[in-house]
Image (spheres, rainbow, N blue to C red):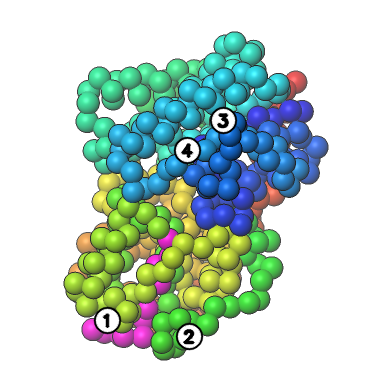
Amino acid sequence: MRLIYLHQYFKFPDETGGTRSFDLAASFVKKGINVTVITATSDTKHKSNKRWKVVEREGLKVNYIFLPYGNHLSYFQRSMVFVTFLWFSNFRLLKLKGDVVLATSTPLTIGIPALFKKWFGKTPFVFEVRDVWPEAVIAIGAIKNKFLKKLLYFLEKIIYKNAYAVVPLSTDMQESIVTRYPHYASKSSVVIENISEISRFQKTESEIDLEKIIGFKPRFSLLYAGTFGKVNGIDKVVELAKKTLQIDDKLVYILIGSGAEKDNVIQIAKDIGVYGKNVFILEPISKNELPKWYNSISIGSSFVIDIKELWANSANKFFDTLAAGKPILINHEGWQAEIIRKYNIGYVLPLNITTEEARKFVDYTLQSNLIQEQQKNAISIAKEKYSLVRAVEKYMQLFDKVVK
């Protein structure tokens, strides 16, 4: 079988960013599938005199188009990157031969080349929903124009209508799709959550010397490794840090990553007096470097701003934490909060962090027996529900139905 994998942000493990697409694609190759990837990159090592550069690596044939991109860009600038990628990937995809296309969002526009490939190339496609676009971006106020909203909802509907299957990454995303488009319920019946890549996070015994990096040995450490974007609400971590600093100054917060809000978060941390005391903000690292960090900290974390539509997210941070066998802290409700409570694998922090709530969190960090129990539960749930093996099995069953 020939699979064309369409993902605007495809990353290898030695790069910064999520590796779900790589992990799946590399596993498909091991199953005997021929995989070609179409993606964009802002890595200058892939700049070329030609529009497209093809790299063969790990059994994959990756088609790169160089398009500088980052959270520092405005929504308009990012939209123009989407449009540029959409335009050129359309023609690239039509030239390639394949039996099925797997198009993974975001953005929603990633579905357009897949649509054209179906209409003009007679190739079926599966559409993977990583975020409920455009519902989420409209909810955060990124898109206000009424005509554009209607256009995006129309595009969403057309993509779902033409896809052989729609694969949401969480039950909350599935519920959103089914509620708004009940006649496509059968197409979105398979949920394939983000992946806890257990072999990557369990194979290392090396650790980071936190005392050397921050200047003292923390009693308890929280790690945030991800994007500093507007939707991530990392200022909430700083707010929590300010309140817990007065209670226990050996409880520290380590924030790793990049994004449009990073400088702002650093400034807030400095202004309220926690920067360099119990908040330490570091540069982004590759996926391959993450395991030793998770091996060194007490709890992982994932944050979002106070918008309900964002609760449906399937963040890498959640699944990486479980794969590392560590408890997870989040600051929102939704399906992840339900999983945390049901299986006792972490802590759900209220969005409104009062002094009392901060004290409750400090008390939680002192319960060593509970933390140890949650560590065992975390790796158990990662293996049982979110392993790469399980995700690949679901996709192989789906591909068998598409390519009969």
Residue under the point 54% across and 26% down: 89
- Residue 307 in picture, x, y percent from top left: 27, 46
> Upstream in the sequence, badge 1 or badge 2?
2
Disc number lying in front (1 or 4) = 4
Disc number lying in front (3 or 1) = 3
> Upstream in the sequence, badge 3 or badge 4?
3
Residue lying at the far top in this picture: please name it: 120
Disc number lying in front (2 or 4) = 4
Residue lying at the far front in this picture: please name it: 49
Residue at label 2? 212
Q: Nearer the viewer, residue 249 or 390?
A: 249
Image: magenta residue range: 246-257
Residue under the point 59% across and 31% down: 50
Q: Are marks 2 and 4 in contact (CB under 8 Å)?
A: no
- Structural distance between the alpha carbons of marks 3 and 4: 10 Å
Q: Nearer the viewer, residue 283 or 384?
A: 283
Q: Residues within 10 Å of mark 3 (few under 14, many from 20)?
A: few
Residue at label 3? 51
Q: Residues within 10 Å of mark 1 (few under 14, many from 20)?
A: some
Residue 46: mark in rendering:
none
Q: Quadrant of residue 100?
A: top right
Residue under the point 37% across and 18% down: 154
